[in-house]
Image (spheres, rainbow, N blue to C red):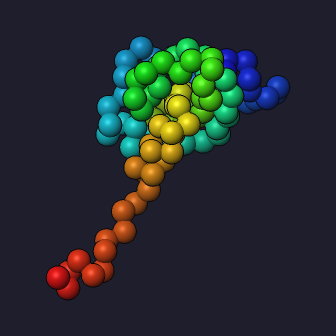
Amino acid sequence: MIGSRPAGLEGPAPEHRSGRLSVAALRSVIPGRMWGGKGCGVPCDYCRVLVSAEEIEYEVEAQLDGAPITLHFHARCYDTWRLSREPRVPDPTAAAK
């Protein structure tokens, strides 16, 4: 998906990283803009399996500790990551049991 951003995109370019993000880091990422398209052969930031050109890839511009970062996900991994970031609402009936 490199090169798929709209023309005139402002702001610093996200830095490339070589290491895998921890689960805690993935949960603390602040997502920004997102694009979808053909995979570009990079590892998914959730499952670490390569996102092939035959698969849909979601690319997310985000902030991690104030630094820009680009995340790459399979569609199903993006959904799982997004749901894991949502605050958990306690079950009010659990206390009554």
Residue furthest out toward the right: 7
Residue 8 x/y as whole percent: 81, 27
Residue at image coords 56%, 37%: 75
Say which quarter of the image contains residue 46: top left
Residue toward you, 68 or 84: 84
Residue furthest out toward the bottom: 96
Residue at image coords 74%, 23%: 4
Residue toward you, 77 or 18: 77
- The quarter of the image holding the N terminus is top right
* Residue 20 showing in the rendered view: yes
Say which quarter of the image contains residue 14: top right
Residue furthest out toward the front: 54
The answer to whether residue 22 is left or right of residue 35 is left
Residue 23 x/y as whole percent: 32, 37
Say which quarter of the image contains residue 24: top left
Q: Is residue 84 above or below residue 71?
A: below
The answer to whether residue 80 is left or right of residue 24 is right
The answer to whether residue 66 is left or right of residue 23 is right
- The quarter of the image holding the C terminus is bottom left
